[in-house]
Amino acid sequence: MVAPLEFYFDFASPYGYIAAQRIDALAQKHGRSIDWRPMLLGAVFKVAGTQPLTEYPLKGKYSTYDFQRSAREHGIGFRMPSKFPLGTVGACRGTYWLKATDADKAVPFLKAVYKAYFVEDRDISSNEVLADIAADLGVDRAAFLAGIEQPEFKGKLREVTEDAIQNRGVFGSPFIFVDGEPFWGADRLDQIDRWLSRGGW
Amino acid sequence: MAKQIVFYWDFTSPYAYIGANMIEAVARKHNRSVDWRPVSIGHLWKAIPDRTPFPKVKMDYMEHDWTRSAKLAGLPIVTVPNPFPTDAKLPRLLFYRLKEQNPTKAVAFAKAAFKQYWGEGRDIARPEHLKAVVHVAGVPEAEIVKAAEDGAARQAVLDSTAEAIEARAFGTPTFIVDGEMFWGSDRIDHIDRWLAQGK
């Protein structure tokens, strides 16, 4: 069996959001599945000594502009959220909880969270908002709220984030591994497409 | 007449090397010409209050990425030339000196110098290495020495760098298409579509 595309992302990452809208078609084209791995970019920034792109002068302003142009190019709805960046611990844990307990809902959930943030400008740092999103997918609210507090899923998130930083060389979002080959950025999806077609170069 | 695509770049930027070999085909497709404007990236960066730090893990990836991207574009690449970065002052001056005489020749020189540095890893700060480059571009060797003393060329570097800073560029390659800024060789596809759609 061929390996899944490992898709590391942060829920507050605009390019992560854009890539998340396009990666399914790409994976499907090449008969691959996707292993969705939300992580905490804040922890990555701390280790790397960096900060969110938008915080830098000049580059920050340009990147905000580029997010919108890039989304528009692919017909993806996007608006810069009013609260940016924000905490995504609950969204990450919720994804891992669903992966473990109701796997079919994990991807619809993470897609819905991204949409809630980058299209509807909802505050996805709030567990209540996340529970609403889960409930819309038929997940029990109370079970969700309890699930994201379970040590198992707190630990899972910590483990994925630490492994990404320590062992995989992840320093941004999205970060996609194709048979071990690292690709950083939504603007590398076309290269991934060619990489999969050609078997690398 | 349609406006030129302004192309700010420096020899020390691997993505500028890639972009320099890709932008003309896109420009031609849309009946545009390219105004090649090398800048001093060191001076550009000095003008920026707060640059993005470059942790080692990112640098390692970037080296991998520019190598992979160059190969995808069919360009020779050594990954890290020696030395990297280098002082590209002399080839910049020579570029502007040649541009004044014959812009096509200047571009041929720029591509040859890019290839020498990024494709073969040889230092283009050294006049003896530049000799091989000017040969390829059909430029007399004597131009190298003259370029070092060329006041107009020096002013052109300063002017272009100042204009790039004014345009709020923060790295190279930067392209300005009818006032719209695009940063990075990976945005040339966007430029293509932007010009096709007229926005």
Image: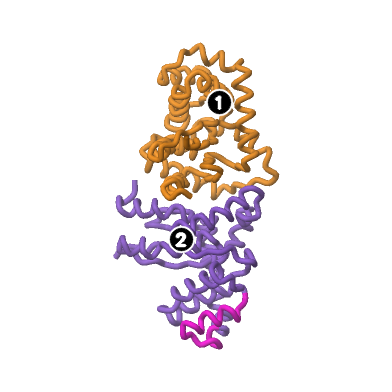
Chain colours: A purple, B orange
The magenta span reads A126-144
Rendering coords of residue B133 (x, y %): 45, 21
Where does residue A195 sit, x and y in percent of width and height? 35, 51
Q: Marks 1/2: CA distance?
A: 38 Å
Q: Quadrant of the N terminus of chain A?
A: bottom left
Mark 1 belongs to chain: B
User: Which secondary structure lies at badge 1?
Assistant: helix
Q: Which mark is residue B92?
A: 1
- Give the position of the C terminus of chain A as an image quadrant: top left
Classify 10 Å Cα crowding around label 1: few (below 14), some (14-19), many (20 and above): many
The amino acid sitting under disc 2 is Ala
Q: What residue sits right under mark 2 in the picture?
A: A19
Taking B96 as reference, is A179 above or below it?
Answer: below
Could you say where residue A158 lies in the image, as x and y percent from the top left? 56, 69
**Residue furthest top as drawn:** B142
Look at 56% across and 72% down and name the residue there: A120
* Quadrant in the rendering for residue B59: top right
Specify whether residue A130 is painted magenta. yes
Q: Is residue B78 above or below residue A142?
A: above
Instruction: Tally the marks.
Output: 2
Q: Is residue B187 above or below residue A156?
A: above
